[in-house]
Image: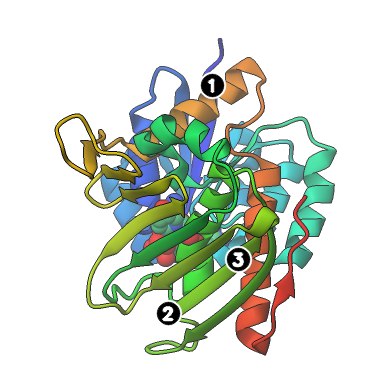
């Protein structure tokens, strides 16, 4: 089987790690180029990958590749992904797939006529916890409530976008992935603390059959938190995504006489799994593990939350 000729677009914080993963797949991938727009990034790319071509524009190497990883700022995703698809290239795009519903609609039109793999980097789906819990969540009798916290102290990254596009997108996607009841309405409120974008937000989702979810996200918080909690008449399950632990309290007592069960799960290399899956889809002509529809639905939820943040109104959700 021919190796997949690959380029990585963007040699920033995450682009470096994507390059490392391309290197780790020498059996299936031929690392052709790094496309980095700015000189400082180009220099770093050259130092880290002396045998890879470094260019500043994708057009320079478009005919030399089969696939590309888009790891540039969100505002560039639409233009770069459209260009790659129009040139019949397989695309792995970091989340979010694009910036808003308008771009999503155009991307859908372009992608639907192309026979290529388009994978979206919703990396939080790769926690081992979901292998253990997804079926249980999918069959949970409504109503249930979901609470998600994702907060960290200020790191100065991704300030070109707000916390909804940068962080909440992980949780909005997880809700679609893990639960059967779909969101129908969104209301959100937030604060601009350090930047001109939303630095902290609370998003409330009304879901089918009286289910609901609340997501609290912040990038100027006093402590690091990443957890997801599900509560129903059957009890409570909490997943600490930071320490990789699952806690359960049902309405019965555990055999050892305790009321809370604790289970650790293995921390995985999500990026490595994403790369493995991408090459597998390309080489076996299989759909991407997280594809166009997932990417577009997450963008729609983000767009709806941003509309609610801007207007203070509740916004209806229409998922594809
Ligand atoms: N899945 C995750 O958990 C996760 C984590 C972090 C970042 N991300 C996503 O990855 C993307 C990149 O984030 P980052 O933190 O690495 O950003 P970054 O700003 O550190 O890096 C982006 C790089 O892209 C370069 N660039 C900008 N425009 C370009 C263009 N047109 N062509 C080529 N290079 C260009 C910049 O010079 C910079 O080096 C974002 O979309 C972000 O949402 C995802």
Q: Position of residue 48 (x, y in %)?
A: 27, 45
Q: Nearer the viewer, residue 216 or 156?
A: 216
Pick whichever of labels 3 and 1 is earlier in the sequence.
Answer: 3
Q: Residue at 25% of width from left, 33% of height from top?
A: 266
Q: Residue at 62% of width from left, 56% of height from top?
A: 298
Left or right: where 64 falls relative to 248? right
Left or right: where 279 falls relative to 126? right
Pick whichever of labels 1 and 2 is earlier in the sequence.
Answer: 2
Q: Residues within 10 Å of mark 3 (few under 14, many from 20)?
A: many
Q: Position of residue 111 (x, y in %)?
A: 77, 43
251 shown above or below 277: below
Q: Residues within 10 Å of mark 1 (few under 14, many from 20)?
A: some
Q: Residue at 60% of width from left, 57% of height from top?
A: 211
Would you name the residue on which mark 2 appears?
Answer: 200
Q: Are marks 1 and 2 in contact (CB under 8 Å)?
A: no
- The N terminus lies in quadrant: top right
**Label annotation for residue 280:** 1
Considering the numbered disc 1 on the image, is that residue within a helix, a strand or a loop?
helix
Q: Position of residue 202 (x, y in %)?
A: 48, 76
Q: CA distance from mark 3 to mark 1?
A: 35 Å
Q: CA distance from mark 1 to mark 2?
A: 38 Å
Q: CA distance from mark 2 to mark 3?
A: 17 Å
Q: How many marks?
A: 3
Q: Residues within 10 Å of mark 2 (few under 14, many from 20)?
A: many
**Residue found at the very far left of the displayed protein:** 256
Considering the numbered disc 2 on the image, is that residue within a helix, a strand or a loop?
strand
75 shown above or below 88: below
Mark nearest the camera among 1 and 2 is 2
Pick whichever of labels 2 and 3 is earlier in the sequence.
Answer: 2
Would you name the residue on which mark 3 appears?
Answer: 205
**Label annotation for residue 253:** none
């Amino acid at each position: 089987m021919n190796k997949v000729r690959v380029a990585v677009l963007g040699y920033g914080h995450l682009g470096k790690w994507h390059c490392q993963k391309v290197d780790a797949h020498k059996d299936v991938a031929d690392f052709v180029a790094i496309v980095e727009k700015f000189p400082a990034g180009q220099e770093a790319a050259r130092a880290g990958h002396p045998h890879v071509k470094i260019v500043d524009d994708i057009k320079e190497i478009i005919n030399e590749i089969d696939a590309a990883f888009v790891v540039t700022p969100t505002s560039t995703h639409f233009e770069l992904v459209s260009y790659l698809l129009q040139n019949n290239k397989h695309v792995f795009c970091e989340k979010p797939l694009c910036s808003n519903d308008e771009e999503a609609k155009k991307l859908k039109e372009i992608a639907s006529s192309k026979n290529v793999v388009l994978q979206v980097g919703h990396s939080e789906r790769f926690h081992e916890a979901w292998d253990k819990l997804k079926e249980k969540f999918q069959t949970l009798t409504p109503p249930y409530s979901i609470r998600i916290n994702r907060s960290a102290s200020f790191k100065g990254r991704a300030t070109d976008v707000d916390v909804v596009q940068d962080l909440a997108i992980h949780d909005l996607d997880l809700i679609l992935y893990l639960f059967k009841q779909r969101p129908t309405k969104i209301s959100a409120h937030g604060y601009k603390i350090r930047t001109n974008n939303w630095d902290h937000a609370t998003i409330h989702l009304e879901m089918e059959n009286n289910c609901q979810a609340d997501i609290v996200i912040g990038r100027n918080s006093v402590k690091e938190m990443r957890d997801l909690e599900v509560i129903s008449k059957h009890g409570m399950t909490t997943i600490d995504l930071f320490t990789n632990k699952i806690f359960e309290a049902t309405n019965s007592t555990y055999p050892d006489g305790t009321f809370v069960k604790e289970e650790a799960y293995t921390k995985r290399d999500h990026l490595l799994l994403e790369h493995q899956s991408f090459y597998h889809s390309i080489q076996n002509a299989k759909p991407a593990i997280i594809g166009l529809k997932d990417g577009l639905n997450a963008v729609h939820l983000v767009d709806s939350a941003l509309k609610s943040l801007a207007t203070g109104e509740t916004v209806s959700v229409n998922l594809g």
